[in-house]
Amino acid sequence: MRSLKLLATAAIVMLSGTTALAGDSTQTPSPASVKALWDFYSNGWTNQAVVGEFKLCLEVDTERKSATRFECSQAAAGTLEQGTRVYAWLAYLMPKGSETEDVMVQFKHNGIVRTTHDLTLKGKFMRNRSYTSHKLNKSGEWQIVVLQNGAELASATVTVQ
């Protein structure tokens, strides 16, 4: 029960405090928010991932010595051309030292699952990143969904011509 409370607190901190934690230098998170985040990261007893950010990208920086390694370097926007490779990129938080293999990314075309990619997520750092890709080879609406144990963690939709 304590782990679920910590997870819920961390999710609230990550999602509701996104502007304060993600670059809005005019706001400072409350000490209670910071403490809850530390407690979840240091003492959490769950392998549940908290997705702080999810994007569809056209490129992910994979340069070994780059300061932006594993970051989404070009977000997908607007309508995409048929045959475009799209990266499902996420930044997540998990308790330090935890690992889960029950996260998957589904690429759905007009509501039908076309492919599923399994992800192994690890709680190595305060801000972890992972990604997978798929070539969107059919025109229409594509929905990309991140799931853990059947529960949706994040999703995004894009149109392909």
Image: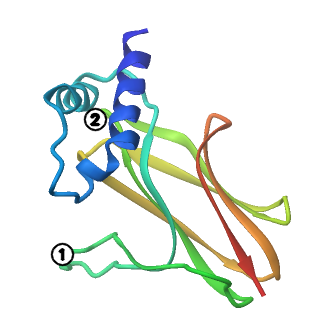
- The front one of 31 and 144 is 31
Q: Quadrant of residue 28?
A: top left
Residue found at the very far front of the displayed protein: 26
Q: Position of residue 68 (x, y in %)?
A: 25, 74
Indicate the quadrant containing the N terminus: top left, top right, bottom left or bottom right: top left
- The front one of 151 and 132 is 151
Q: Which residue is mark 1?
A: 67
Closer to viewer: mark 2 or mark 1 = 1
* In the image: residue 82, left or right of residue 55: right
Residue found at the very far top of the displayed protein: 1
For residue 23, above or below residue 20: below
For residue 141, above or below residue 58: above
Q: Which residue is found at the position 37% from the left and 11% from the top?
A: 2
Indicate the quadrant containing the C terminus: top left, top right, bottom left or bottom right: bottom right
Q: Position of residue 108 (x, y in %)?
A: 77, 62
Disc 2 or 1, which lies upstream in sequence? Answer: 1
Q: Which residue is mark 2?
A: 97
- Total tally of numbered discs in the picture: 2
Q: Which residue is found at the position 56% from the left and 80% from the top?
A: 77
Q: What amino acid is at disc 1?
A: Ala
